[in-house]
Amino acid sequence: MDIQTLRDRHPDHWKRACAIRTLTLDAVAAANSGHSGMPMGMADVATVLFDKHLRFDPKAPRWADRDRFILSAGHGSMLIYSLLYLTGYADVTLEQIKNFRQWGAITAGHPEFGHVAGVETTTGPLGQGIANAVGFAIAEENLRARWGAKIVDHHTYVIAGDGCLMEGVSQEAIGLAGKQKLNRLIVLWDDNGITIDGKVSIADVTDQKARFAASGWNVLACDGHDPEDIDRAITAAKKSDKPTMIACKTHIALGHAAQDTSKGHGALTDAGQMAAAKAAYGWDYAPFEIPADVKAGWEAMGKRGAAARAEWEARLAALSPAKRAEFARIFAGTAPAKLASVIRGVKKAAVEAAPKLATRASSEKVLAAVNPVMPETIGGSADLTGSNNTKTADLGVFTPEDRKGRYVYYGIREHGMAAAMNGMALHGGVRPYGGTFMCFTDYARPSMRLSALMGIPVVYVMTHDSIGLGEDGPTHQPVEHLAMSRATPNTLVIRPADLVETAEAWEVALTETKRPTVLALSRQNLPAVRKTHTNTNMVAKGAYVLAEAVAKRQVILIATGSEIEIALKARDALEAEGIGTRVVSMPCMELFAAQDEAYRRKVLPPGPVRVAIEAGVRQGWDRWLLGQGGREAKAGFVGMSSFGASAPMERLYKEFGITAENAVAVAKSML
Amino acid sequence: MDIQTLRDRHPDHWKRACAIRTLTLDAVAAANSGHSGMPMGMADVATVLFDKHLRFDPKAPRWADRDRFILSAGHGSMLIYSLLYLTGYADVTLEQIKNFRQWGAITAGHPEFGHVAGVETTTGPLGQGIANAVGFAIAEENLRARWGAKIVDHHTYVIAGDGCLMEGVSQEAIGLAGKQKLNRLIVLWDDNGITIDGKVSIADVTDQKARFAASGWNVLACDGHDPEDIDRAITAAKKSDKPTMIACKTHIALGHAAQDTSKGHGALTDAGQMAAAKAAYGWDYAPFEIPADVKAGWEAMGKRGAAARAEWEARLAALSPAKRAEFARIFAGTAPAKLASVIRGVKKAAVEAAPKLATRASSEKVLAAVNPVMPETIGGSADLTGSNNTKTADLGVFTPEDRKGRYVYYGIREHGMAAAMNGMALHGGVRPYGGTFMCFTDYARPSMRLSALMGIPVVYVMTHDSIGLGEDGPTHQPVEHLAMSRATPNTLVIRPADLVETAEAWEVALTETKRPTVLALSRQNLPAVRKTHTNTNMVAKGAYVLAEAVAKRQVILIATGSEIEIALKARDALEAEGIGTRVVSMPCMELFAAQDEAYRRKVLPPGPVRVAIEAGVRQGWDRWLLGQGGREAKAGFVGMSSFGASAPMERLYKEFGITAENAVAVAKSML
């Protein structure tokens, strides 16, 4: 259909859609930066979705049972800002639209979770939104099964572009969603045939419809500018027993001189071309001006949602007070009161039994105690369940047949798992944790960074956290991965040494609400090192004195996780020579950095030689060895400076010099 | 077919295949570690491949025109070690097989490139091999087009498992190969229906055949234990004008009690079960014993390859001496003699013109000079060609219609691009470089790590290397990525400051043979800072004195890339106050670390206050600020400690305090 036909046939729809198009043109022009073409191309689809299908209430943007709308093609951020402004989200004012991409504005270049109510997830890195959406849909299914459809009953809609579908993570998402028959998940593919470098066909000939169908999806198509056809497709999608992909055939930068070209992807700021496009739309208003009748039409959509929400509030109110409180608690993401006593119980038992355990096995013990009192946890692993020790007996398995199951077999999909966990955490009501080998942090990185950027409490259970992995060799042995995660802002990296510290680590992770946690856990067995019980969570302090010097303190050994055992042995040897040696356990640098200076100086007083022992690279340690101002101490490091190797782990520690003998030698060389 | 039928119908084949199976069982049992089931399941396919199709010569494992065999499912490493031992590769002795997974053995847990001739690429992290293979096939096509089929004419065969196909990177690889019609690429999918956590169906219902077909592949199937059927399928695959995927229906751990189960994936070491499996095979020999006639059958396969190689050597010898020398040069990976003078020319012109340029634009200028004298370069970008400045006018575009083209439109596939570049570098004869935004290092990480682990000279052109990216915001602004790459062993990270340094950086990258290089390049324009010409490559020293103190030296400012400009301004301000200030440019920490101590102390003498300025996190800097022994200097840092934000870049630098004023204040606070 040409533009004139579209205008004539559906004049009200057309004006509403053009409100998106012109706000986009105006905001991008004001910023002299941004992406005009995608919102202009998908305006019709988004208008129909909001008008006819999406259940939302701009006055209650965090309403738990709203439909979720995810703009996976996040560069088209003016689409979502337009939608939120037009429908009446209070925070997205016209002033914010005018300040698109400026310092301090909530209308960032890409949609940022936490900036704008109505932005469900941070998108921009392509493929993330569609993969998050799988987690949103899993959370919805699980909560619906547990709470009933009167309380939880909504859809997840995604707008995805060719970039999203070319990124590999999309295949992981598609595969998982297809297997899980997530039929509340509806992906609207912006099938415009254009990427930055040219036509999609210069890099891809994939028949996307056949590809989705191959993974168990319902596949539909529509003319992405024809409101009736769009409505027909979405209506049909909602009836499927499978997730649905709707191929929406669109023109990028519709009506602009750059329509259907790569140039249309970017910032369309030429004044003459903008005027011509607006003329073609029949849009005769000032920049940023939305006629009152058009705005009213948009606001009416949100008001319909308000009615649905009121009905839902009534149903919620009919629950028992205890149930209502529980519902509020899980959506607030706060841990249950019981958690503290459960953790204390594990710690006390651990001190008594003093088991020699891999921390991954310790982690399983903690989860076995925690999962029964935290019904909101949803565990999983990227096909390493037995190795990651992530599955406890009570969880059940999440499948199309058992939606109450709380364990997800993610398949060999570390990236998809991480992205899905982000989606679950963002959905709310569930608390996801998932495992893989620490080395495969690499595969999950793009989503792990977004956990940190969004500030959501996903827990990454990263086992086999060093050369202690042994025979599988350097492809599977993390060396730089602790440093990588520690370099990432707003991320807790915790490497516990025994069952007590592992219990404390989980307590930190499960009470955290604003940050992801990376748990680095050993493959190999480790001795119990916390010999006396304390109610205090010592891991929460980041670092603490595990063993004090007996002779005059000349050395402080600082270690984490599996190297605590080595530090304690080195201390014994040094003390035997009359060299007083303190051992500091430092399971979490970020938490230690957050302590006040007095505590930090108590743990790491200036003066004694400091030696850190960790089976990873030195990068990140100098802060604690030397003090950031310098001159605090003489310091040495015992760890890795190369990739690992394939051999039994005892041999590797010896060959790479991560031994008590070497720690002693390094310490003595500096006295 | 049951085992008895297989034994009866093809007795010679059966014995050869069982040589793989029993070597695998014996080696895994000796190591008490490893993966038995995959080699046992794919033994028939591999035997037919080596017997009837693969062109190889064990006496010349690096023969340039050999077929490439890639074991993407790298955990099945005993499959490839068995094949290499049986066919007579000199380095893979029976002793090495017996020392599988032991310290010092070349038979690592996963196949490691560089350990074993015949291992074309390091695999283990799933999906990498199949994605490398796309690069191998691109290199072959390009070289065949340039050198003619008499000199380059071979296939790339891949064995991939369900894990490889579930990893997202496989989709990127499949999409790229399908578009490029890489019909010399043949993927043998080990369709055994089993993963570590259980049946594939617990996590995936994808119809893999339909999925590959959707991306433009030829798809075939065979009974993976029937040698005739396997041969038929491979023969048909070689005739296709598309890449081919052959679904080989197999039984994991064939003939063992653990056949067709998850347990079969791992180490099958039970003596009784091993004996029973061998009995079922009709294999009545001692552990590690291969009957002479079976070994002779295997060795005959390699001998056939030797004849083909002799013919090829004759064809190569018929080339002109200059052409032969050029062929040898590109496969040795050495830069042409001309490169040095070309780089010098760029540097001289740059000093004269002193252009204000983004280093990404400088990089394009260098490439425009270099690409014409280095016909082995193959450039590309993950759909950011215009932003990464990676395409020069002379390259042409690699397509099914123009195989001589030297620019690859990789699509929105950072991971697939990195993996394909690894494959190209490993194939030899070409030197790949490819671009994306520095922030999307995250997406490419698994393959970037493997570039480093394998020690291959891939060049990553990472533009938009800081908050200088501006309005696109924190999802696109690297903060921790310099630290991440620097934490990775065996990786050069170079962040040049102007055109001269960029030319030097490229010279380092293009003469390097054993390490990947990450070039961190600015989006924003930067002034020329190298004012006088020197033939010496200063970047190759890692760091050097860019501007000496005039007044008595009290401060050393150390910076990289876009922050050199800020350091120079801060120096002016400090000098104006009589505080003598040296500016050290440190484009590459790894190269500086490799200098002798005398040079390092000359550049960074103890005493003066040191302040580093870099628009990234501090992690990694303390080594240079404080010295690894500590106490060298008082030190400060001006950089990032959080994620960035969306705003024009000038504003971001100011708001995050990365300014000359702040550098001056930090320096003075320590004097």
Image (cartoon, coloured by chain):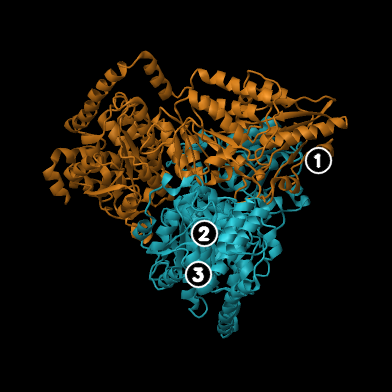
Chain colours: A orange, B cyan
Q: Quadrant of the N terminus of chain B?
A: bottom left
The residue under label 2 is: B41
Q: Position of residue B56 (x, y in %)?
A: 57, 73
> Can you see residue B557?
yes
Farthest left residue in view: A8
Q: Quadrant location of residue B551? A: top right
Mark identifier at residue B8: 3
Q: Position of residue A509 (x, y in %)?
A: 54, 28
Q: Secondary structure at mark 2?
A: helix
Q: Chain of mark 2?
A: B
Q: Are discs 3 and 1 both within one chain?
A: no
Farthest right residue in view: A577
Give the residue at x 40% y 73%.
B239
Q: Secondary structure at mark 1?
A: helix
Q: Chain of mark 3?
A: B
Mark in the foreground, 3 or 2? 3
Amino acid type of the residue that numbered disc 1 sits on in the rendered structure = Glu
Amino acid type of the residue that numbered disc 2 sits on in the rendered structure = Gly
Q: Quadrant of the C terminus of chain B?
A: top right
Q: Nearer the viewer, residue B464 or A299?
A: A299
Amino acid type of the residue that numbered disc 3 sits on in the rendered structure = Asp
Give the residue at x 18% y 31%.
A297
The residue under label 1 is: A661
Mark identifier at residue B161: none
Q: Real-space Cα distance between discs 3 and 2?
A: 18 Å
Farthest top residue in view: A321
